[in-house]
Image (tube, rainbow, N blue to C red):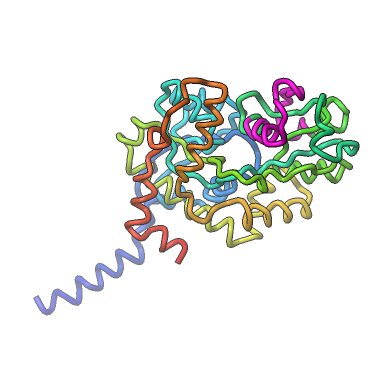
Amino acid sequence: MKKIAPFLLMLSAALILFWPPLGESAELTRIRIGYPSPSASFSPLFSAKEAGLFEKHGLASELLYLQGVQITQVHVAKQVDFTVTGAPLPLRAAVEGADLILAASSIDKFIYKLIVEPGITNPADLKGKTIGITTFGSLPDVAIRLVLKQWGMNADKDVKLVQVGRMTDMVVALSGKKIDAGVISDPTSFQAEKLGMRRLLDMADVDVEFANVAVAVGRAYTKSHREVVMRFLKAYVEGTRRFMTDKEFGIKALRKYTGTQDQEILSKTYDLFASKYIKKNPTLSLKGVETTLAMIADRNPKAKGRRAEEFVDTSLMEELEKTGFIKSVWP
């Protein structure tokens, strides 16, 4: 036995050194992930994809750009396994009975800019004006309604909200004077400012905790594929760290997924999201989910009295905390 032991040690070392990683030796589990816009809000997802972190955790990922409320419809139809999206979308569907829950949340504040034509200098100037949003029911729609309410205005009476579509279309509509203001995310908001539009408000400064960008997954899928969900979240957490700690890499990912080529705009966008908007640890905020449900209840009575705990699974991120995974990523 004493003669065999050294051989076993050498064999073990050889296996560790030369055995191929999971993504190369084992068949990867295929997953489809939907996201609703080419916004820097989804940088952790983009970074996880670009850094090969899904493959690291045994997942072959396909990212699908599904605009607006379409993303939830596709998820409910089980055409995707995960969505990284504005939390109000899956929450609205869940209130109506859809089998969706929130598993994580990267951003717990509004990250849109209210960009206006130069003649608008204060909130009162918005009365009677036309404000562009992506689609009705989208996160920009929710955000502007809350902001207008805080300013003492009714979104359905004091202004006219119109659906414009993509963020880039919003800039075109503003430049063409088809709308007077637009709810725009970065980096597109910087492009609008370069064209002479002005920023009336950074919605991140609004004092409200809100479930903004979240990871949504099917409740039944989580039960039957919990290990896959855990691997997804591990890649997502590591993608968050890679984005927040590697500016060159982060800008490269932003350039690819947002389509923005302007280096100055990309740098400003990266700095904002890495330092102000995105959380290191995407643990769900129950308070933020409650705020979101309350906003949904303003337009859908079915959401009244519902509790955040009904629509989330906090055990997933809690497990990553308890096992020391989060600490290993963020020592």
Quadrant, the C terminus: bottom left
In this picture, residue 66 sits left or right of residue 228: right
Instruction: Quadrant for residue 199, please give it.
Output: top right
Q: Residue furthest front?
A: 152
When the figure is inspected, residue 245 is found, relative to residue 72, above or below; the finding is below
Instruction: Quadrant for residue 267, please give it.
Output: bottom right
In this picture, residue 177 sits left or right of residue 1: right
Quadrant, the N terminus: bottom left
**Most foreground residue, 269 or 147:** 147
When the figure is inspected, residue 3 is found, relative to residue 37, above or below; the finding is below
**Most foreground residue, 45 or 100:** 100
When the figure is inspected, residue 68 is found, relative to residue 54, above or below; the finding is above
Q: Residue at x 49, y 30 (%)?
A: 90
When the figure is inspected, residue 270 is found, relative to residue 293, above or below; the finding is below
Place of residue 100 in the rendered image (x, y in percent of width and height, measured from the top left):
42, 30
Q: Residue at x 79, y 37 (%)?
A: 123
- Residue 143 is one of the magenta-drawn residues: yes
In this picture, residue 87 sits left or right of residue 135: left
Range drawn in magenta:
142-170
**Most foreground residue, 324 or 148:** 148
**Most foreground residue, 265 or 174:** 174
- Residue 208 is one of the magenta-drawn residues: no
Q: Residue furthest bottom?
A: 2
Instruction: Quadrant for residue 86, please give it.
Output: top right
Report how many numbered discs are placed on residues in the image. 0
Place of residue 212 in the rendered image (x, y in percent of width and height, measured from the top left):
56, 40
Place of residue 210 in the rendered image (x, y in percent of width and height, measured from the top left):
55, 41
Q: Residue at x 42, y 29 (%)?
A: 306
